[in-house]
Amino acid sequence: MTNNDHTTQPTQNCIPAAACDWFVCHGSRTHLQSTCASRVAASSLSERASLTSSTSSAVNSATVHGFHSVLPAANPLVTHTCLLGDGCTFPLEGTTTSIYSHLLHHGLNCKHRDRVPCPWPECSKEMRWGNVARHILECHLHVRLQCMHCGKTYTSEGLGAHRKVCIAVSILAYLTRTTVNSSLTSR
């Protein structure tokens, strides 16, 4: 491998992934995962929209190499409109994997614990990179999760609180049915 345009070691202040696709050139995610709070905050919509086609291969590779869905998909077949770049036509599915892949397509990728501003237009909330996809799904795309016990839909935080009550109610109902059925059969 020649070393004309790139350094062999990732730098602390990475250039956008679209300009130097380290993952494709060198087979390493390290370059794409450098500290990037300033890159997320500073990148303009026009920069995000002017990505090269080589980034799409990095998107496909990155989803294989470590991204995973934190939340179960509400309905991954439903696609949403991306507001990160003018004329972006790539589908946004209702999964964290799809969101992280899509953000990578726009040249945005950080370490899991990096604190970054939300990349969504007109949102200035700061959070850890590991929470960005969930935040976009819940706050900007309004994706909700369904309780497997009762079928009602909630945000992930709301579902966590609801699940404690719903499971307790389900267990209580099961125990009541079991007790009633066993008392009827013992007569």
Image: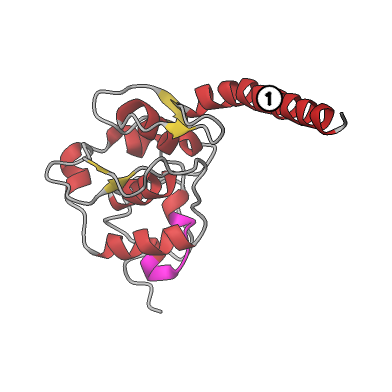
Find residue 163 and report its horizontal and vertical position in percent: 60, 26
Find residue 70 and report its horizontal and vertical position in percent: 52, 42
Find residue 156 and report its horizontal and vertical position in percent: 50, 29
Please say if 15 is above or below 155.
Answer: below
Q: Which residue is mark 1?
A: 173
Please say if 28 is above or below 173.
Answer: below
Would you call the spot at circle 1 few (<14 residues within 10 Å), some (14-19), or many (20 or more)?
Answer: few
> Relative to the observer, which residue lies in front, 168 or 19?
168
Q: Is residue 123 magenta?
A: no
Q: Residue furthest right?
A: 186
Q: Give the residue at x 21% y 40%.
A: 81
> Relative to the observer, which residue lies in front, 70 or 51?
70
Report whether residue 115 is seen: no
Position of the N terminus, as image quadrant, is: bottom left
Q: Is residue 26 magenta?
A: yes
Find residue 30 and report its horizontal and vertical position in percent: 49, 56
Q: Give the residue at x 37% y 67%.
A: 24
Position of the C terminus, as image quadrant, is: top right
Q: Residue furthest front?
A: 187
Occupied quadrant, residue 186: top right
Q: Give the residue at x 33% y 61%.
A: 21
Tell me how many marks there are.
1
> Taking 5 as reference, is 28 left or right?
right
Report whether residue 77 is seen: yes
> Relative to the observer, which residue lies in front, 136 or 2?
136
Q: Give the residue at x 72% y 28%.
A: 177
Residue type, label 1: Ala
Q: Which residues are magenta?
A: 24-31
Q: Residue furthest bottom?
A: 1
